Amino acid sequence: MTSTVVMDKAAPTRAVKYGSMSRDRTWALRWSYFFLTLFAIFSLVPPIYMLITSLKSSAEISAATNPWWVFHPTLEYYFGLLTSNQFLTFFRNSALVSILVVAITMLISVPAAFAMARMRFWGSATLATGVFLTYLIPDSLLFLPLFKMFAVFSDLTGIQLINRWYVLVIVYPTLTVPFCTWIMIGYFASIPKELDEAAIIDGASWFQTLTRIFIPVALPGLIAATIFAFTVSWAQFLYPLVFTTSTDQLVLPVGIVTTLIKGDVYNWGQIMTGALLGAAPPLIIYAFLMDYYIAGLTAGATKG
Amino acid sequence: MADVTLRKVIKRYEEVEAVRGIDLDIADHEFVVLVGPSGCGKSTTLRMIAGLEDITDGDIMIGGDVVNDVPPKDRDIAMVFQNYALYPHMTVAENMSFGLRLKHYPKAEITTRVTEAARMLDITDLIDRKPKQLSGGQRQRVAMGRAIVRNPKVFLFDEPLSNLDAKLRVQMRIEIKKVHQKVRTTTVYVTHDQVEAMTLADRVVVMNKGRIEQIGTPNDLYHNPATRFVAGFIGSPAMNFIPCRLEDVGGRLHVRITDRITLPLPAGRAARYQSIGRDDKLELGLRPEHIAEAKAHPEPGYEPFDAVLDVTEPMGMETLIYFTLEGAQVCGRVNPNAGARAGGPLRLAVDLNNMHLLNEVTGAVI
């Protein structure tokens, strides 16, 4: 007895939908445009509202007119803020803190990432995970212990750090260094192993391999990390609110809120103008660095 | 330039022993190819010579000095990688001169050397391009140029042609040979391709499972393989292995393949195999070119037999034929006009003057 396979030729077959691929694609595109537009509106409305408000006189802001239109545009808040010493001090503090934090972050996280990505030493993988876990601890959990530490430090050494703008230069890297190290580990790990082996055989030291091969090749990652570190330090609110109180030590976000809100009086025009001016530097830096942010810089190193 | 010596070199990764005691002497100016299947330890051996891997045990000497603990940059070697490993942000000239610039060579000297190497490799026009603007073959030339300008004691090649297509590979093979004939630098070359090994090497080192199977000139390995592994690895199509026994028929030593096919050995071979036990399990090793269509007037040592072909592969200048003997697939090469067709019979002759006899148990060639 042999087994036979019965072919049921009358079995129903599924209708083949020709061109269904492109139809699916069209719909996918429509949906993505729909949601992207929605998202763009959602994120652009607040800044546009800020811009509109910043151009109105305080009389017009409080008047019951169309809030989305400026009838009598004025630049008085812009002139006011840009000639106010207080506002320029905030600006200077913010700039100094951010630039120093970016510099410190890069000086620590790039060599650290290189070591963890390439130098196989005991516990390097665990250390890399540990670095990332550090980043997961929220700043709202850290500010009290940090404050206490600075207070004790001040008692012991007499060096006053609290209520000085440069305390932020010490505090912010606790947020930026772990994340930037993590980003750079990823970028360095994506560089083919043969590239540093070739450099080593060519006679490069570890340091030369880092500075002459890894940093140029991982430039997109470096820029991403720089942008992140700058944004975090520029926009940080909780730490400066806690650690600085005198008006000459404040940074922009805290400065605007604490000096332009007097009791229950909100100077909306000035607040909006200050916030817009404060948002300008990161925007300029994005625009400038994005030109260098070219993906696929490693193309051509190896067989692609 | 210098000679390279390996003494009982062992490489162990935790549990696995990748290289199990290698002894190798490479003379000055020599071109030695390490060949073997993947995982045989050939690349690990090369990387140990380069200093990219530590040596678990044994000694490696370059130019008479033990370099076990010398870092790669002080070994005065240059290496060409399978995936080229060019620095993507540097131009061709910068790639080639990187090593010299690190060692602070004078600018004029660097320029001279780069120009010279670029001319030798025919990449003078590409000198200002970035690697991503180059084709695979051009990238490989640049990688070689980077090695040449350093003028090292030893060149190390780690499967440099594996990423190229077949045609380019043949071309670059010739290129590498030309370069070696010009610069005469001691070269260690790793490949899994036995054709590359045969065509390039002064001497071939066949490796298997972390050990050296045989060292010899290409012709030596081809005609006098020491083991079944070497016999089967070198040559394409590969050598046929047919189960057989020895038998005395009418006072003459015969090799018995099947009940139907028992072939008398030529006098020279018979003397050599006389002492083998008649019941030993043996294998007859025959290269495809020694199985051809039977001629009307065969030379001595050519023994005819009949076969039914399974498959034929016309190659133009010859036709490869496949048939089965004692469960083993056998390949032969016949004249395209011999009338070979799949499913059809063909009278063939084996050239027993070029036969090999292998011990089926130990794999040794007798």
Image (cartoon, rainbow, N blue to C red):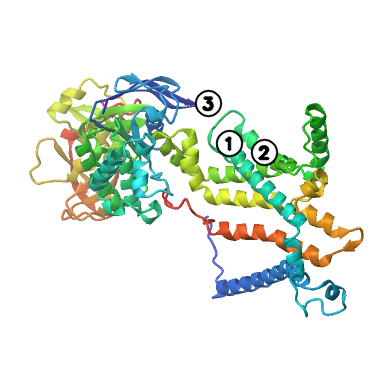
B175 sits to left or right of B48:
left
**Contact? badges 1 and 3 (CB < 8 Å):** no
In whole angstroms, how far apart are the C-alphas of marks 1 and 3?
22 Å
Total count of labels: 3
In whole angstroms, how far apart are the C-alphas of marks 1 and 2?
10 Å
A109 sits to left or right of B112:
right
In whole angstroms, how far apart are the C-alphas of marks 2 and 3?
28 Å
A107 sits to left or right of B264:
right
Same chain for labels 1 and 2? Say yes or no.
yes
Under tag 3, what secondary structure? loop
Task: Identify residue type, mark 1.
Answer: Met
Q: Mark 2 lies on which chain?
A: A
Task: Identify residue type, mark 3.
Answer: Glu
The circle on residue A116 is: 1
Mark 2 is surrounded, within 10 Å at the Cα level, by few (under 14), some (14 to 19) or many (20 or more) other residues, namely: some
Image position, residue A139 (x, y; %): 78, 44
Q: Mark 3 points at which residue?
A: B14
Q: Name the residue under label 2.
A: A131
**Contact? badges 1 and 2 (CB < 8 Å):** yes
